[in-house]
Amino acid sequence: MSNINILANAKCINVADSISLHICSWMLCQKPIIKKRARFYCSDKCRDNFYDNHLWDFARIKAMKRANNKCMKCGAKAEEVNHIERLNGGKRTFTCLNHQDNLEALCRACHRIITNQQLKKKKLYEKPSFTIEEFMPLFAKKNDL
Ligand SMILES: [Zn+2]
Ligand SMILES: [Zn+2]
Ligand SMILES: [Zn+2]
């Protein structure tokens, strides 16, 4: 649990540090924890904020509510929630990529368009999956047929 993905602009304290330093885990707070039974948060409000910005089930519902259940691109009924900075294979269950400013509620059509744009963008930076040494024998084999 201590290995949280951190957004470039996010400053959450990871849970392990939060326990040892006795400071609130929620990045916008970071106050000392006084209550003994609370381990990561200074208050119920910070716990709720932390859940709404990290745990996917809470973050998704919060993102929908924030957008009044309307697609943030076209205003149609929102059905899905998109990560603006992509998870890139990471799990969405518990991550700083679930911060509300990284989520947008979308209708299915807009989500599909945006996901395709995000995938295309990623492809530009992707390394070729073969090195030239690996590729040449395949090329030669194909020409033999
Ligand atoms: Zn707090
Ligand atoms: Zn839409
Ligand atoms: Zn965070």
Image (cartoon, rainbow, N blue to C red):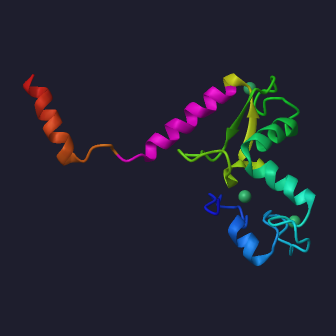
Decide if residue 144 is on the left or right side of residue 106. Answer: left
Residue shown at 80% from the left, 62% from the top: 26
Which picture quadrant has residue 117? Answer: top right
- Give x and y (percent) for residue 41: 84, 64
Magenta span includes 126:
yes
**Quadrant location of the N terminus?**
bottom right
Q: Ligand 3, what quadrant? A: bottom right
* Viewer-nearest residue: 3 or 27: 3
Q: Which residues are magenta?
A: 110-127
Residue shown at 59% from the left, 33% from the top: 115
- Give x and y (percent) for residue 43: 91, 63
Residue shown at 14% from the left, 27% from the top: 142
Decide if residue 44 is on the left or right side of residue 64. Answer: right
Q: How many marks?
A: 0
> Which residue is the extreme one toward the bottom?
21
Name above or below for residue 62 compared with residue 101.
above
